[in-house]
Amino acid sequence: MKEKFKSDFEIVGNNIKRLRKEKGWTQHDLASRCSVNREKISRIENAEKDYMYSTLLEICEALSVDISEVMVKNQA
């Protein structure tokens, strides 16, 4: 991951974590609803790994949210 995008990945990760927790889901629960394993969910939530746009779309679909919801700052 390029360092200049780190804050953007942190925003997305924090929003995914918040939305997942609002549903009362574990990382495993979210992973089981899309084709992403639990470890990747963890790395995305903690901004430890770059990911493909299609992966983000799958996660949004599983969470039943529009992609814009996970990209917005200050949603906590």
Image (cartoon, rainbow, N blue to C red):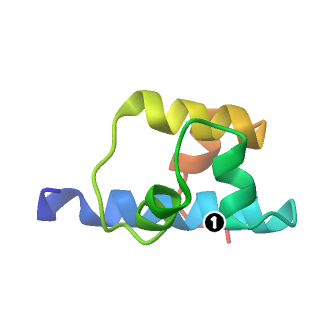
In this rendering, the answer to whether 25 lies above or below 31 is: below
The x and y percentages for residue 9 are 36, 58
Mark 1: which amino acid? Lys
The quadrant in which the N terminus is found is: bottom left
Lateral position of residue 5 relative to residue 69, left or right = left
Q: Residue at label 1? A: 17
Residue 52 x/y as whole percent: 34, 35
Q: In this view, does 53 lie above or below 43?
A: above
**Left or right, 66 with reference to 5:** right
Foreground residue among 39 and 12: 39
Residue 37 visible in the displayed image: yes
Q: Which residue is painted at 22% across and 57% down in the image? A: 5
- The number of numbered badges drawn on the structure is 1
Image quadrant holding the C terminus, namely bottom right
Residue 38's spot in the image, x, y percent?
Answer: 55, 59
Residue at screen point 47% across, 63% down: 39
Taking 69 as reference, is 67 above or below it? above
Q: Can you see residue 75?
A: no
